Amino acid sequence: MGETNDVRWLDEWQQIAWRAFLAGNARFFEALGAAHDAELDLNIGEYTLLVQLSEQPDRTQRMSALADGLVLSRSRLTHTVTRMEQRGLVSRCAADGDRRGVNCRMTDLGYEALVAAAPGHVRAVRRLLVDVLDPEELEALGRIMSKVGTAARRELSEGAADC
Amino acid sequence: MGETNDVRWLDEWQQIAWRAFLAGNARFFEALGAAHDAELDLNIGEYTLLVQLSEQPDRTQRMSALADGLVLSRSRLTHTVTRMEQRGLVSRCAADGDRRGVNCRMTDLGYEALVAAAPGHVRAVRRLLVDVLDPEELEALGRIMSKVGTAARRELSEGAADC
DNA sequence: GCGTTGTAGTTGAGATATCAACTACTTGAT
DNA sequence: ATCAAGTAGTTGATATCTCAACTACAACGC
């Protein structure tokens, strides 16, 4: 449509930064996943879900809020929660006030699994990220990725609106 | 084993940085994937694979080198290349010198697909990352993630050796 | 009230990813 | 030469993810 045909390609140094971001990311998550597989009973997604629940009152949160918080599609969350429910880590119950709503609640077993996994997880995050960087670097990474996330979020909600 | 039981939990500010990294990342790749889905015939993985091939002599590279370069498991690369081969984007042929080896080569059709996708891809990368950050920030991100990637790579190869 | 539109969550089919074998070849030691 | 160990790549079963319906309820306008 209103698009012009000329593209501003990336400069050499931008290419380098972009590729370092891509590759570093891939390796980081590969290694973190490997650490979880090796010593923990929860994969990264399951662990993160339980952390999120552990911070809610009554260890309970609406499915939609959980999906937003974890940046997961509704469908993916449904499937994940179904699997975790079968393992007894979480349970579902009706949300009060809105009969469409479903609450997801961390069970005692889920809490035990979280407590058991936490040390290994945190050690891995330190080994692979926090202790690898100087404090200023870690702080900068957080600030930068927060900016990036905000931009992405804006684009995603705009995209949903422009139909 | 020789592990002590006490864990150095993350400080508040470390938590904040780590979570911003996680969430920013998730949102960024979600948005980049959405941009590819919306306007391009190649998803991010396929696009990246073709870029990698386009930079090799004769647009050809050994499967194992390709897997290393893209930070993909051998198995995943095999499946991906099989699908792309069925679409005519790449072709396989025997590597010379090592009869176990297989070369992956980008076809003319693959090249056309890459050329067609490149502008949209680069625009999305700019919109979502490069143009969102100050030059110093982008440069810092590249440097930091390169450090992280190196640490992860070291851990992964150590892990393979310690058996 | 009644219809329209929007939201919450699920479902199932198809696409993709992972994991553990497996084949075929190479390398190096004896 | 022969054998053991390592490397390259594939395979297929299983697990997980995605996408497009679909159900059920809520909210709003009239």
Image: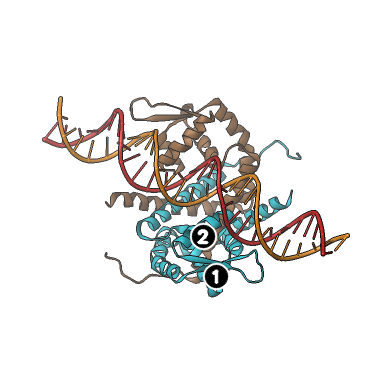
Chain colours: A brown, B cyan, C orange, D red
- Image quarter of the N terminus of chain B: top right
Is A119 in front, or is C2? Answer: C2
Q: Chain of mark 2?
A: B
Q: Earlier in the sequence, mark 2 or mark 1?
A: 1
Name the residue located 60 percent from the left edge and 42 percent from the top edge. Answer: B10
Residue kind at label 2, given as amino acid type: Val
Percent position of residue B57, x then y: 55, 74
Q: Is residue B75 visible?
A: yes
Name the residue located 44 percent from the left edge and 38 percent from the top edge. Answer: A77
Per the image, the residue denoted by label 1 is B60
Mark 1 neighbour class, 10 Å CA radius: few under 14, some 14 to 19, many 20 or more = many
Count of marks overlaid on the render: 2
Q: Is residue C16 left or right of residue A158?
A: right
Residue kind at label 1, given as amino acid type: Thr
Percent position of residue B25, x then y: 48, 51
Percent position of residue A81, x then y: 47, 34
Q: Secondary structure at mark 2?
A: helix
Q: Answer above or below: position of B2 versus B37.
A: above
Percent position of residue A137, x then y: 57, 55
Q: Chain of mark 1?
A: B
Q: Secondary structure at mark 1?
A: strand
Q: Answer above or below: position of A112 versus A20.
A: above
Query: Are the two marked residues, 2 and 1, in contact with CB atoms closer than 8 angstroms?
Result: no
